[in-house]
Amino acid sequence: MKKSKKKIINSRVFRVLTARKSVVVCMIILAILIFAAIFAPLVSPYDPYKQNLKNMLQHVSLQHLFGTDAMGRDVLSRIIYGGRVSFTVGLVSVLIAGSIGMILGLIAGMSGGVIDAVIMRIMDAMMSVPMIIMALFLGSIFGKGLGNICLAIGISMVPSYARLTRGQVLSIKESDYVTAGTLFGASNIKNAITHIFPNSVSPNIVLMTMNLGNAILNEAALSFLGMGINPPTASWGGMVNDGYKYMTSNPVIAIAPGAFIMIVVLCFNMVGDALRDALDPKLRGTFGRKHKLVGKVDVKKN
Amino acid sequence: MNNKLARMIIRRIGQSIIVLLIVTLMVFLLMQLVPGDPIANFLGANATPEQIEHYNKLFGFDQPVMVQYWKWLIGLFHGEMGRSVALQKDISEVIFQRLGITLSIVIPAFVFAVVLGIILGITAAKNRGTAIDSVISFFANIGMSMPMFWFGLILILIFALKLHILPTSGFVSIKDGGISGYFSHLLLPMLVLAAGPLAQFTRQTRSSMLEVIRQDYVTTAKAKGLGKREITFKHQLRNALIPIITVMGVTLGGMIGGTVLVESIFVVPGLGNLMITSIKGRDFMVVEDGVLVIAIAVAICNLIVDILYGVIDPRIRND
């Protein structure tokens, strides 16, 4: 047990990830917020759906840390539950985008020729339409609701993964170990699965962590425009939209959820950056190591 | 012009046209999948079946899908975009008027983001590790993570509601409001739109400059005794420019998408707003034409980016 723990702590990836304090702080913040989202029913002080019109539009107080909204619902509770929506959409849409994109990229890269050209032109076409508009479209087709939004946002993010994977596949295809595989009788498909795919995964993972923030922003934007997750479900974007009307009297209703969006996206971006640095082979070396001497110097000798 | 460069440009234009054709097909087919009917929406709940059928015939919606598509495509080549059901106007008239308004926000925002971003990025790179670098990098990170509608909200709160300097929303043309009216309505939307791209340009410039600074040709230049400014601009920035130009291309596309949000927040009657109302109102033709116009704009930007690559880096012309 001790040996494997030491191995993880000494591994380059871990060292790079924990090298900067700011990144560690971000990871802790994310952990806390994700924990709160998962255990929302336990953590949240009030029921986010319970309306109490006598209590509406209360200002920040000890009982309601962020006040109440127009229907008397506690804003803090709605923020905690809204976190569920944001994290779920972020994670699921990125996973959808990654899986579909990687498969398409793999097929395009391995097939070459017409199939490659067709797939890539379709990806180019999708990239010509700004993501929000694409997501708006797809949202209109699939309808509202959490799963549909994940699908809409996920599909709109597919092109970058497809392109990335295809590029990876094209360069890995020429590698020696793949040629060796073919010489040993591996068919194209077997080569693809055992050699090419695993080696093309890591840039995709980096792209996924960096896209998480984007996905959350897109969901918030869609909810803000009224085309995403709608009330009474608590979603951060939707809360900002609702809060707009009370800008002058009770700005906290809109500012608080927006601030949380920013914090979560910021943390994901910083961790994504660190992850990218960690997985970048060009940065091999003394990253994060402290004063490691080349050889062991025994000062006491003499 | 260089022969190779010319050939590369022609090839890229050809590719763009193919991609645009695919966009038209894709948008058309997707809109067919959207539930809802523009005629029914427009006429309302009291419409009789005869009325619906009459309007369907008028707009040509009763014909088979591929026929509609073909007619639309042919029409486009003649410069006709069809009529909007909801607005009862020619679509081309509506789109180009709104495009003008959208561009009057996007272009200044873009220029602002590029110029300031490059300056901040160079400053951060040159002062790496110091407080200046930390502050710039911190704000760049925040700028990339902020939801636009939230930033807009905060700016409105501060400038319009508390300080009363700027209007909260709307759009005023130079004719109606004069230069100051035009600018005061433009400033907040422009800032909100530019925030994210500004952050991205700063980050990208900073990281490109950092990479370039360490290169041999910089040491050579210093050994030759070249002045600081000459080194910074002639050698470092030029080489750092390529990834920055990539970001420029991507960002401009993103900004056009961002106007959807900005126009919604500040109630600006631009193309983005038109897209939202038309998607909600199931006004198919408007959406199809609008998306096509947007895609053409994005394609032109990408083309310019690729041409710039070819001009700046002679190695790329062989591609």
Image (cartoon, coloured by chain):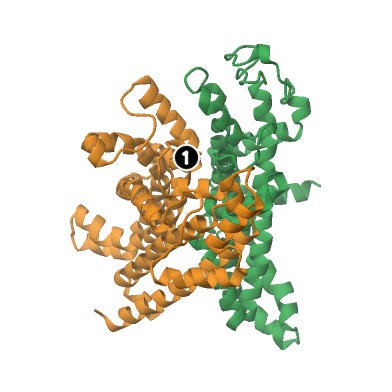
Crowd tier of the residue under label 1, counting other residues whose Cα lies within 10 Å: few below 14, some 14–19, many 20 or above:
some
Foreground residue among A14 and B255: B255
The residue at 34%/29% (across/down) is B167
- Quarter-of-image position of residue B34: bottom right
Residue flagged by tag 1: what amino acid is it? Ser
Instruction: Inspect this view and state whether residue B184 appears.
Output: yes
Residue at the extreme front of the image, as rendered: B50
Across and down, in percent, residue B241 comes to 34, 60
In green, which chain?
Answer: A
Across and down, in percent, residue A25 comes to 58, 35
In orange, which chain?
Answer: B
The residue at 63%/58% (across/down) is A155
Foreground residue among A57 and A41: A57
Foreground residue among B10 and B308: B10
Across and down, in percent, residue B224 comes to 19, 63
In what quadrant of the picture does the C terminus of chain B appear?
A: bottom left
Across and down, in percent, residue A298 comes to 59, 48
Q: Viewed as shown, does residue A109 lie left or right of B101?
A: right
The residue at 58%/32% (across/down) is A260
- Quarter-of-image position of residue A123: bottom right
Q: Name the residue under label 1.
A: B264
Q: How many marks?
A: 1
Is B226 placed above or below A72 here?
A: below
The residue at 64%/46% (across/down) is A90
Helix, strand or loop at label 1? It is helix
Instruction: Inspect this view and state whether residue A206 appears.
Output: no
Is A62 placed above or below A167 here?
A: above
| Chain ID of residue with mark 1 | B
- Quarter-of-image position of residue B230: bottom left
